[in-house]
Image: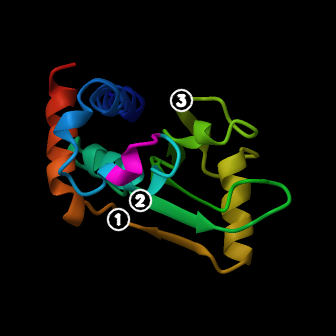
Amino acid sequence: MSFIYHTHKFRNALAYLIEFESYKLLDCNGWACLNSFPSGSCGVVSDLLGTYLTEQGFSGVKVIRANTQSEIFPGVNSHAWVEVNRKYVDITGHQFPQISDSRISIQDKHSSGWLYRYAQEAKADFAYDEGEPSIDIYADLYQLVAHRVESI
């Protein structure tokens, strides 16, 4: 299966848990960020998705974190998303309705898409980081989402 397929399954499982089974998440690290999903949850969600895609056998998965205030992207002070197979994958970008209304956005890494342009601005401001996904403090949360993915 493609990373796109797995991304959709993961996002559906996460959204289901948040919407219908949030009581299961209350004691998990990361719940406070997910309580207003997608707003303010991009970092946690990107680490969770990146870990899931890695466990599905995709190599070289990275989490991108960018922090910059730009006139081009008003209202976006920071954002995080995943890179896999030279594509940017964003499942929380619709928190910025002035920029994206897609629940799942997949863009070429070097395209004219907003994620590439935002990353370039953050790099110019020395406010850009990319690394392997980490769920060290979100292990319980990750297990709940991964279990929900299996039942979809």
- Category of crowding for the residue at label 2, using alpha-carbon neighbours closer than 10 angstroms: few (below 14), some (14–19), many (at least 20): many
Q: Quadrant of residue 9?
A: top left
> Which of pointers 2 and 1 lies earlier in the amino acid sequence?
2
In the image, residue 132 lies in the stretch drawn in magenta: no
Residue occupying image coordinates x 38% and y 33% = 7
Residue 108 in view: yes
Q: Are marks 2 and 1 in contact (CB under 8 Å)?
A: yes
Q: Is residue 128 above or below residue 71?
A: below
Residue occupying image coordinates x 45% and y 46% = 85
Q: Is residue 143 shown left or right of residue 118?
A: left
Q: Nearer the viewer, mark 3 or mark 2?
A: 3
Q: Amino acid at mark 3?
A: Arg
Q: CA distance from mark 2 to mark 1?
A: 5 Å
Q: Which residue is mark 2?
A: 62
Residue occupying image coordinates x 22% and y 38% = 145
Q: Is residue 20 above or below residue 145?
A: above
In the image, residue 33 lies in the stretch drawn in magenta: yes
Q: Quadrant of residue 144?
A: top left
Viewer-nearest residue: 76 or 135:
76
Q: Amino acid at mark 2?
A: Lys
Q: Which residue is mark 1?
A: 132
Stretch in magenta = 32-37
> Which of pointers 3 and 2 lies earlier in the amino acid sequence?
2
Q: Is residue 44 shown left or right of residue 27?
A: right
Q: Which residue is mark 3?
A: 103
Q: Is residue 10 above or below residue 132?
A: above
